[in-house]
Every structure is written in C-alpha cells, then in structure tokens.
Amino acid sequence: MGSSDFPAGAQVAVALSGGVDSAVAAALLQEQGFKVVGVHLRLAAGGPGRGHLQALAQGLGIPWCEWDLQEDFSRLVLDYFAGEYARGRTPNPCVRCNMAIKFGRLWHRLQENGVPFLATGHYVRLERGGDGTPEMLRGADRTKDQSYFLQRLPRELLPHLLFPLGEMTKKEVRQRYRDLGLPQAEDYRESQELCFIPQGRYQEFLQERRRGLGPPGDLVDCQGRVLGRHRGLEHYTVGQRRGLGVPAAAPYYVVELRPQANQVVLGYKEELFSPGLRASGVNWLIDPPEGHLRARAVIRYRHPGVDADLYLDQNGEVRVSFDTPQAAVAPGQAVAFYQGDRLLGGGWIEERLP
C-alpha cells in the first residue's frame, strides 16, 4: 500500500522512538504529502532525552508530543514478562508490547484525538490482496524483517497503518538518515535486547519485580532420573546448553521446564527436537480458516520456519505438525504462520508435542 491509498494530506502519527528508523519513516511520509506528527511513548526509565527528541522533531520539521504510558507498560508488559517466567514459560515481550502498547494503547489515544493513521519504523510491508483488503508481508530486507513481532495486530487495524520502510534495507535507511542531517543522541543505541533490561540481566529484573526468585529444585533427565540441582526455574530456558553444571559424555540441553514439580528436564540434542506444537489464542490476519491449513511455521524470531500442517479446532487452538522436527519449541513463545511472504497470523505456544 502506497501513499495513493490514503487521502491526500492525511494526518498520520509516527511512533517516534528517537532512533534512525522512525525518524526516516517520518521524513518519507512528509515527502509523500502526509501531515505528520511525532508521538514518543515514555514506557520505562531511560531512553532518549527530551533534548534529543526535540532536536529530532526540529530537524524533521514536525510537531511532536510525549505520552507517558509507563503505568500501562508496567501492567501489560512487565507484569506479563515476570508472570510468564514464574509459570516456567519463555515470554516474548516484544510481541506483547506491539499488541498491547504500540498498536493498542497508542492507537486508542490517537483515535480519541482524531488522528486517523499510525506509522512506525517497522520493516514490514502492507499490500492490497486480490479482494482489496490489506495483507501484511515480510519486509524486503529479510535480515531486518519484523513481521513476526506484529502477528497479533487486529486485522481491522491494517487499513489505518503505514510502514514506510518496508521496501528499504537497513543500509539505505541509515544512509537516508545521514543525508537528512538529523542528530544522533550520544547515549542512544538501537535496541538489540529488551528495552527495559538494557544489559540483558533479566534474573536481576525478575528478582526485583517479584521480590525474589523461585526455589532450587531437581535437574532430571527425560526418564525422570535426578541428575543434579537447579538454581531456580528463572535461570533456564528451553534449548539452553551452557551453565547446567551436569557432566556427561555428550552435552545436555534444557528440554522442558516443569513448574508444578519445580523440575528442569535435561536431554541430549536429539531429545530437544519435537514433531510439532499446540498453540492457543491464535490471531488471524486473514479470513479465519477452518479445519486444516498448510503454512510455514516460525517458532521464534530469526527461526527460518518450517513447512507444517495446521489443524484448527473450535476453541481457537491450533495443532501444528512440522514436516521436519524442530529444536527448542518453547511454551510461552509466539508462533507465526506464513504462506510465502504473507503473514497469516500467529498464536502462543502452549506445549511441544511428544
């Protein structure tokens, strides 16, 4: 979908993070004739200062404002993140944040203020399908494609969204930012880890958030034999190899977490593979299918995907049967479904199939 799909001179809010991508997105929309306003979401401590945001907006020649959504972010994302670890699951806060905050609370506030369109610097594309409705596609730069993180957007929101960077590469975007002569904050860096845990020390965050971590328990093999003791479930994720402290002829991996028994299940590499998974809470960006569907399943960000059969039930759950067994299927993570470059939707992984 290009600028011709929207009313001439339409007002659009750009989620202005303070980084390169959203700034270039705003500049491109201005060039296309949109009336652009920048909105920065203050979600947690840290992040770009107001001075940098002001200089950025000034360089772009757009008005901007800052909305404090720290309370919403704490309740909808941070509580979720800590709660999933407490349940022995592997959360995906970026998928959750996009659904609840960036395309949830932000969009609702824009509607309240009469702003009809929202744009972000995500590397995804929107194109009109054969029936004229928008379809979400992978970004042209496959190394930066972020469609996986947007699998839970409401389908009815798609006609109101713009993703100006969808056809660009990251290299082209960086060059465009330099050509625009926009300022770069000295203390701002592109987010690589969790934005609310900059150093990646999530156990420290969980300990502070929950006022303590879970108790130690048994490390067991897939047959239930005790191999040693673990330090608490929060220190382990499915697929983990390092830091297990159990000597063996071949390396052990974390195969499963069992919160009710307070056990970490270890297995050899071949035991890490699963023929499929069960997913719940599936969100569809297409007409909801019935019965059976062939698609490519992506079980985590950067996963290349695997062709699979999807079997849908009346409760909105999907059983996914992989053509080839996959390693480290982690309950709590998100699974996305594709046909070619088109994102069909996705759900939350509940369990790996034996």
Image (cartoon, rainbow, N blue to C red):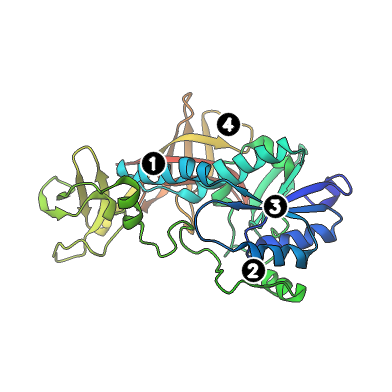
Q: Mark 4 points at which residue?
A: 289
> Taking 59 as reference, is 247 left or right?
left
Give the Cα separation between the discs numbered 2 and 1: 33 Å
* Residue behind mark 3: 65
**Which disc number belongs to residue 71?**
none
Q: Is residue 284 toward the left or the right of residue 207 in the image?
A: right
Q: Which of 103 and 108 is in front in this view?
A: 108
- Between marks 1 and 3 in the image, the one whose residue lies nearer the viewer: 3
Circles 4, 1 touching at the beta carbon (< 8 Å): no
**How much space separates mark 4 and mark 3, taking CA atoms?**
41 Å
Of the residues shown, which amino acid type is indicated by label 3? Cys
x, y percent for residue 341 = 62, 52
**Would you name the residue on which mark 1 appears?**
277
Q: Where is residue 62, by image quadrant?
A: bottom right
- State which tag comes first along the sequence, 4 or 2: 2
Can you give x and y, in whole percent of width and height, for residue 117 in the image?
75, 44
- Rounded to the nearest angstrom, the CA distance separating label 2 from label 3 is 26 Å
Ranked by sequence position, the earlier of labels 2 and 3 is 3
**Mark in the foreground, 4 or 2:** 2
Secondary structure type for disc 2: helix
Image coordinates of residue 168 in percent, x first then y, are: 70, 64
Task: Find residue 170 and name its label.
Answer: 2
Q: Do the residues labelled 4 and 2 touch (CB within 8 Å)?
A: no
Instruction: Answer few, some or many: residues within 10 Å of disc 3's Cα (few below 14, many 20 plus, some between 14 and 19).
Output: some
* 339 is higher (above) or lower (below) than 194: above
Q: How crowded is mark 4: few (under 14 residues within 10 Å), some or many (20 or more)?
A: few
Give the residue type at disc 4: Pro
Give the secondary structure at mark 3: strand
Mark 2, other Cα within 10 Å: few <14 / some 14–19 / many ≥20: some
Classify 10 Å Cα crowding around label 1: few (below 14), some (14-19), many (20 and above).
Answer: many
